[in-house]
Structure formats: C-alpha cells, structure tokens
Amino acid sequence: MNNDIMLFSGNSNYKLAQAVCKYIDLPLGSAKVDRFSDGEIRIEINENVRLKDIFIIQSVSPPVNENLVELLMMLDAFKRSSARRVTAVIPYYGYARQDKKVEPRVPISAKLVADLITTAGANRVITTDLHTGQIQGFFDIPVDNLFAAPVLLKYMKNYFKEKLVIVSPDAGGVERARAFAKRLDNAGLAIINKRRDEPNKVKAMEVIGDVKNKIAVILDDMVDTAGTLTEAVNLLLSKGVKKVYACCSHPVLSGPAVKRISDSNLESLIVTDTIPLSEHAEECGKIKVLSISELLGEAIIRSHTGDSVNSLFV
C-alpha cells in the first residue's frame, strides 16, 4: 500500500483499528485523544496528513456521546490539516434507531448525526449494518453500508451441521433473515411477531413458521438490553425448538443484557467486533466474537484505489 493512505482511530475501536491496519499492512497513525481537566475532549494529530487519504475508525458506541464528539473533532482536525479526503469508518452507527418520527415532537436523531458528520468534514462514510437502509439517504456524501453477513455466514456454515431455521425477531428483519436462510442450504425461516408499548419493552410475542424439533438461530442487527432476545428464546423453546442460538452484528449489550444472556437458555450469542465488549461481557462464556477487520480493510483499500466494493456485499 502506498504512502498516500493513513488510518487513525479514536478510543472506541482501537483493537479493531489495529487489526484493520494489520490486514492492510500499514501502521496506525499517531493521534492524541484525551481530556482536559474539565472533561472537554482534546485532539492532536501527531503526523503530517497534508494531501493524504485519511480513514478514521470510530464507532458511535457506548459511551455514545463521548465517542460521537471524538469522531466529530477528529474529522474537523483532519479537515483543517489539509487532508485530501477524510473517510469516517463507523462500524456501529449510533442513534440509528431514531430514524423517523414515531410520535409528535421528537427529533430524527439519525439525520442530525449524519448532518454533524458531514459538517465536521467527512467526505465519505463506511459503515456496517445500518439499522435501516434509509439512513444512507440522510447523508449528502457517499455512504457504503457494508454487511457483516459474510463473516457470520462463514462461521455458521462451519459450526452448524444440522439444518437450521433462521428466526427474524421482528417483521423489519425478515429480508435479512431470508437472505441468510437462502445461503445456508435453504434453511427454514420463521418470524416472531411482537408488539411494543415503549422502547426496550415488548408487550406480546408469537411465532410464525414451523420451528418444532429444529435448531433455531435468531438473527438481528443488534442486541441492546437482551430483553426481547431472552423472551424470544423462551418462546421458541416452548414451541418445541431443540436449541436456540443468536447472531447479531452489533453487541450493544447495555444495562442487564449480559446477566440476562448468562441466565437464559440461549446456547450462544455470536457477535462481531463493531463494538468492543465490556469486561463483564468478555467473561460471559455464551458470547462468541468474530472480527470484521478483513471486511473493513478490504473496503478501505477499494475505496482508496477506486475499485468497486460490490463484491463485498452478500
């Protein structure tokens, strides 16, 4: 790789950034990201980036607002340092669930974050498994929405030898579940119909599809508090499922999530490293982490060289 490309990272994805750099065979750029005594974020780039193609790897993950402001300030710093192009590589796009007005007098926060990233100086965005595809349209700059599907599918094909039924936890994830089922030797497909009264709380659930005496894999883009997941596990087992696994791209795992997973009848939760696990989550024997470093690394290389990223999509 030539000297015109440089990779940097904030605090949220340092290990992932190192893995991406190893794949690309480039050192991680030197940048100081710390705090003033009053808590304000301080950014200092320690290298000459003039006319360079810069990639900043930073998830908008917990602590969400801290990591978002770090990203914005890094974008501004590179823009003011005369970088030729700055790409925000955001493995997990925070605020993505606030992508529309679900009731009067609420913000569309996903759009606001898109505006902030663009204004701060991003020329392009590379992200993974947006909560809804429409968020790409919130940006006035190019967005590559990659999918962790190739990484998850490779693991599932090697790990599971029996025929599976892929379970979508809601109607919005049916297309994702159908695509997985098609690529897993035409595995079965089931849907959990659920109703919510408020965020993170489900009122009622029912299974649509044949799941009896099968191994079920619940597929979602993220697991937050794991309340819906663990309820879905119990529901599927009550319908005659032999074992239940789960896969997701983004292990948010906030609040009681890890305890719920540990105490549940879930066999294992397979996740990617778009969000680094907390120490508590790393100690949970049911959580298996797969790396998307090669996927992001290949996308960065192709973005830099101008090659198509189409083959990275499943």
Image: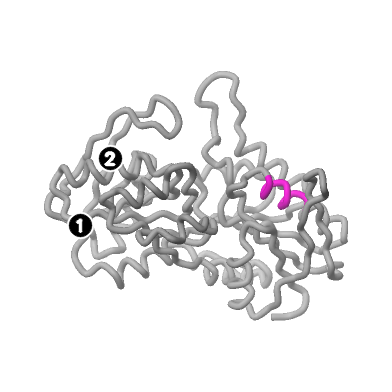
Measured in 3D between alpha carbons, the distance from the residue under mark 1 to the one under mark 2, in whole angstroms, is 15 Å
In this rendering, position of residue 112 left or right of residue 233: right
Q: Quadrant of residue 116?
A: top right
Q: Against 301, is 189 above or below?
A: above
Q: Where is residue 194 shown, x and y percent of the image?
A: 31, 33
In this orientation, which residue lies closer to the viewer: 6 or 274? 274
Q: Which mark is residue 171?
A: none
Check disc 1 and give the amino acid type. Ile
Residue identified by numbered label 2: 192
Residue identified by numbered label 1: 215
Q: Where is residue 90 shown, x and y percent of the image?
A: 61, 55
Q: Where is residue 259 shown, x and y percent of the image?
A: 39, 48
Q: Which residues are magenta?
A: 66-73
Q: Against 285, is 131 above or below?
A: above
Quadrant of the image containing the C terminus? bottom left
The residue tagged with tag 1: helix, strand or loop? Answer: strand
Q: Main secondary structure of the magenta part?
A: helix
Mark 1 and 2 residues: CB-CB less than 8 Å, in contact? no
Residue depicted at x 78% and y 49%: 41
Query: Magenta span has 134?
Result: no
Q: Quadrant of residue 91?
A: bottom right
Check disc 2 and give the amino acid type. Ile
Q: Where is residue 291 shown, x and y percent of the image?
A: 49, 67
In this orientation, which residue lies closer to the viewer: 135 or 48? 48
All told, the count of numbered labels is: 2
Residue depicted at x 28% and y 53%: 266
Residue depicted at x 34% and y 39%: 171
Quadrant of the image containing the N terminus? bottom right
